[in-house]
């Protein structure tokens, strides 16, 4: 085995060891490589140190004052409103098309009266609009739920 391929194998074993996915025979093999190549021993220590740092990292939210200042901006409020409108319109159109495709044979039947077809299409469209509205309401209420972070 060449030096380059041995080092590549050692790096694979280093990553497995850092992730805690290494067996006894592989650990012995890794220790052999670390004794043979001192530069890999340093690399192994750096990887372990980096893994410790990343495992101890915590996400910090910005203070409320930052969010208050953000939402004071007109552009930010308009942007979010337009985003919800476009998402709602797109969801409504896709759901109407999907339901229309399901009932297409009924709507294409020439023996069914036009007003009955209109009633079917209106029921489909109304169901979709209500579905999207309820989903948006549930998402909004979940964000403002006072007790969502309380555990029993």
Image (tube, helix red, strand yellow):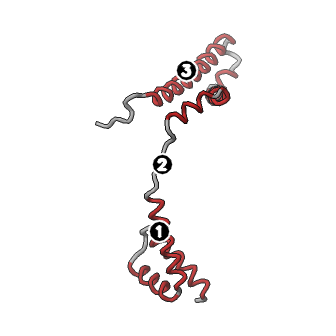
* Mark 3 crowdedness (10 Å alpha carbons): few <14, some 14-19, many ≥20: few
| Proximity of marks 1 and 3: CB atoms separated by less than 8 Å | no
Can you give x and y, in whole percent of width and height, for residue 47 in the image?
Answer: 50, 70
Determine the residue positioned at 42% across, 28% down. Answer: 145
**Residue denoted by label 1:** 49
Q: Residue furthest left?
A: 152
Q: Quadrant of the C terminus?
A: top left
Give me the C-alpha separation between circle 1 and circle 3: 53 Å
Front-lying residue, 73 or 29: 73
Rendered image: mark on residue 35: none
**Residue denoted by label 3:** 130
Can you give x and y, in whole percent of width and height, for residue 150 in the image?
Answer: 34, 35
Can you give x and y, in whole percent of width and height, for residue 45 in the image?
Answer: 48, 74
Question: Is residue 77 in sight in this rendering?
Answer: yes
* Mark 2 crowdedness (10 Å alpha carbons): few <14, some 14-19, many ≥20: few
Vertical placement of 20 versus 35: above or below?
A: above
Give me the C-alpha separation between circle 2 and circle 3: 37 Å
* Mark 1 crowdedness (10 Å alpha carbons): few <14, some 14-19, many ≥20: few
Question: Is residue 90 in sight in this rendering?
Answer: no
Q: Is tag 2's residue or tag 3's residue first in the polypeptide sequence? A: 2
Q: Secondary structure at mark 2?
A: loop
Q: Secondary structure at mark 1?
A: helix
Determine the residue positioned at 54% across, 34% down. Answer: 67
Tell me: 142 left or right of 39. Answer: left
**Residue denoted by label 2:** 59
Give me the C-alpha separation between circle 2 and circle 1: 19 Å
| Proximity of marks 2 and 1: CB atoms separated by less than 8 Å | no
User: Which image quadrant for residue 108?
Assistant: top right
Determine the residue positioned at 50% across, 85% down. Answer: 33
Tell me: 96 left or right of 28. Answer: right
Determine the residue positioned at 51% across, 89% down. Answer: 36
């Amino acid at each position: 085995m060449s030096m380059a391929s041995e080092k590549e194998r050692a790096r694979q074993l280093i990553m497995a060891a850092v992730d805690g996915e290494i067996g006894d025979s592989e650990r012995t093999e890794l220790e052999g490589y670390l004794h043979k190549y001192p530069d890999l021993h340093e690399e192994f220590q750096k990887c372990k140190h980096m893994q410790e740092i990343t495992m101890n990292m915590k996400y910090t939210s910005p203070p409320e004052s930052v969010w208050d200042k953000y939402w004071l901006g007109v552009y930010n409020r308009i942007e979010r409103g337009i985003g919800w409108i476009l998402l709602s319109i797109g969801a409504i159109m896709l759901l109407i098309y999907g339901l229309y495709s399901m009932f297409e044979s009924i709507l294409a039947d020439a023996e069914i009266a036009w007003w009955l077809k209109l009633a079917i299409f209106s029921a489909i469209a109304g169901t979709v609009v209500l579905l999207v509205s309820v989903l948006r309401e549930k998402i909004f209420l979940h964000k403002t739920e006072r007790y969502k972070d309380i555990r029993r």
